[in-house]
Amino acid sequence: MDEIFDEFQQVNEARQNHKNETEGIEPETVTPEVAADDKLKEELALANDKFLRLYAEFDNYKRRTSKERVELLQTAGKDVIVSLLPVLDDFERANRAIENATDVASVKEGVNLVHNKLKNLLTQKGLKEMASKGEVFDADIHEAVTNIPAPDPSLKGKIVDVLEEGYLLNDKVIRFAKVVVGA
């Protein structure tokens, strides 16, 4: 019986020691702070994932548009070049006709036809010739090559002569008119 009592006492002491060791420790419970913290960590992970996906998508967009821009620049003039080929053919025919021509009037007429065809084609593509002679000089669209005394007082500050025509493409200046201004 003493043996049983000794065993009982040892178990009791072990239980008491274990109780003393775990006395300051509270059982783990899910507090609202812990739940909120876990939820915030999960939301942060989702936000980071969305950010990385969006960043990758934007990077792909930049690469794709850059590639498209290069392709566009390489083929931008193709439409105009293709439409100019018939005019080039007409010039070649005119050159062959000039070699054998004896009548200057027919050669002039042929060259004028090709010239008009070219001007009409360029007009269809959005090209406009600037009206300059007799207009007031405008530094935004004209380039003054020189000033001369105005032949008429009404031409003072106005364009007296045009050395090189200026052109607009879709209402934007692509070449400034080189002009002589009356002083």
Image: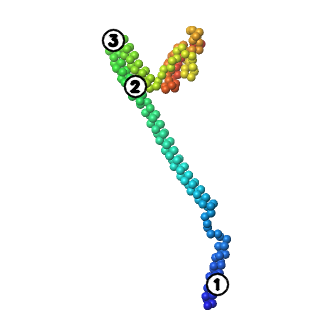
Front-most of residues 11 and 28: 28
When asked about the image quadrant of residue 1, the answer is bottom right
Q: Which residue appears farthest toward the bottom when viewing the image? A: 1
Say which element carries label 3: loop
Hey, what amino acid is under mark 1?
Answer: Gln
User: Which residue in the protein does label 3 denote?
Assistant: 102
Which of discs 3 and 2 lies nearer the camera? The answer is 2
Say which element carries label 1: helix
Q: From the top left corner, tell me how far across and down residue 165 is, in percent.
A: 49, 19
Residue drawn at the location 56% of the way across and 56% of the way down: 42
User: Which residue in the protein does label 2 denote?
Assistant: 84
**Which sits earlier in the primary sequence, circle 1 or circle 2?**
1
| Residue 174 visible to the viewer | no
Q: Is residue 82 left or right of residue 155?
A: left
Front-most of residues 35 and 177: 35
| Residue 165 visible to the viewer | yes
Query: How dense is the environment of label 2, judged by Cα within 10 Å: few (below 14), some, or many (20 and up)?
Result: some
Q: Is residue 153 above or below residue 58?
A: above
The span from disc 1 to disc 2 (Cα, nearest Å) is 112 Å
User: Which residue in the protein does label 1 denote?
Assistant: 9
Hey, what amino acid is under mark 2?
Answer: Leu
Which of discs 1 and 2 lies nearer the camera? The answer is 1
Q: From the top left corner, tell me how far across and down residue 66 is, in percent.
A: 48, 39
When asked about the image quadrant of residue 4, the answer is bottom right
Query: How dense is the environment of label 1, judged by Cα within 10 Å: few (below 14), some, or many (20 and up)?
Result: few
Q: Is residue 20 above or below residue 102?
A: below
Q: From the top left corner, tell me how far across and down residue 38 is, in percent.
A: 59, 59
